[in-house]
Amino acid sequence: MIVSSTAGFMKQTAVVTGASGFVGSNIVRRLLTDGYRVHALVRKGGDPWRLVGLRNKLVLHEGVLDSKSRLTALMHKVRPQAVFHLATYGSYPTQIDLSRVIRVNVNGTANLLESTLRVPYTRLIVAGSSSEYGKKDVPMREDDAVDPNNMYAAAKTAATTLARTFARVYRKPVTIFRLFSVYGPGEEKGRLVRSVIESALAGEPVRLASGREARDLIYTADIADAFVYTAGLKRQIPDGEIFNIGTGVQTTIRELAQKVIRLTGSKSEIKLNAYAGRLWDAYTWKADTAKTRSEIGWTATTGLTDGLKKTIDWYRSRV
């Protein structure tokens, strides 16, 4: 069960970057449910469709992350207790603009950190990525050497280094979450779980690479819970610490497809080797969650079957 973190923390103010994105929008919804005042930072000219129905419950700011002066002014005016940095670019196959990968992930992170230098917030949480680790043969630990094998992972690694160093140099309460494979309602088109579900619901073949590639799949509501729960913690967390946010359980892509087909009652067939695997695909990919459990006291609570059922129901409601 996901537990509300509002005890003693009602009507606090939070700033969320990347607020209209898949993960960011789920965090916004959770914050509003928990009684926060939310300032949502979104990309100028973007379509914040995931925030439909919430616009009168939050304050929306467009294009602020690119401007250090505007961002600093906002932080000093709002003086948030919690800051959640979810703005990102490059994790989707279609996001191949290298200059934008660097601008959003590296420069955007630097702008955010500097803007909060003189703001007395309680917790700033930066979303990193499990892709920073690169391929491993064992569960990934926070103290493992990083070995990014694509430009997005390299940019996220740089952002993590900035946040970690900033926290320690300036003694600021910054925490880095390395997210594993997030799925759930509202995922971007072309992403793994959404693609498998849509194929199954349409009765079309589910096309995979070898099918042996693995993921640590974590439901989006659990991700939102990890962020909001940690922001409200009264216990001390050392500045600049990294924590894995995953389930500690890996699933092969073939197992995922089989489970989705079973849950949907689909007659879809699985087509293996339908396309070539990617450079960064791996047969072992799961979080070691011991540090997160012991130091934060948090663990994911949504099993894969339950998470997939909720996600499938959401897509069915949209057809």
Image (cartoon, grey):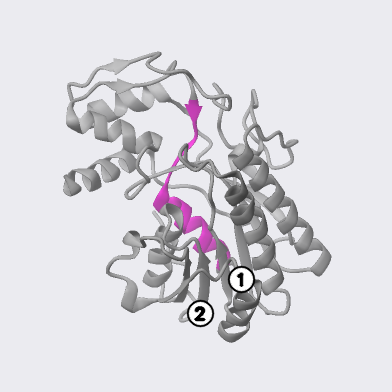
What residue appears at the point 65 percent right and 77 percent down from the top-left corner?
69
* Classed neighbour count for the residue bearing mark 1: other residues with Cα under 10 Å, few (<14), some (14–19), many (≥20): some
Tell me residue 149's x, y (percent).
65, 31
Q: Nearer the viewer, residue 279 or 103?
A: 103
Q: Nearer the viewer, residue 316 or 45?
A: 45
**On the rendered structure, is 6 left or right of 267?**
right
Mark nearer the N terminus (2 vs 1): 2
Label 1 SS: loop
**On the rendered structure, is 194 left or right of 88?**
left
Label 2 SS: loop
Any part of residue 293 in sight: no
Tell me residue 78's x, y (percent).
56, 83
Label for residue 67? 1
Residue 230 falls inside the magenta stretch: yes
Q: Disc 2 designates what residue? A: 12
- Spatial CA distance of label 2 from label 1 is 25 Å
Q: Main secondary structure of the magenta part?
A: helix
What residue appears at the point 80 percent right and 69 percent down from the top-left corner?
170
**On the rendered structure, is 32 left or right of 216?**
left
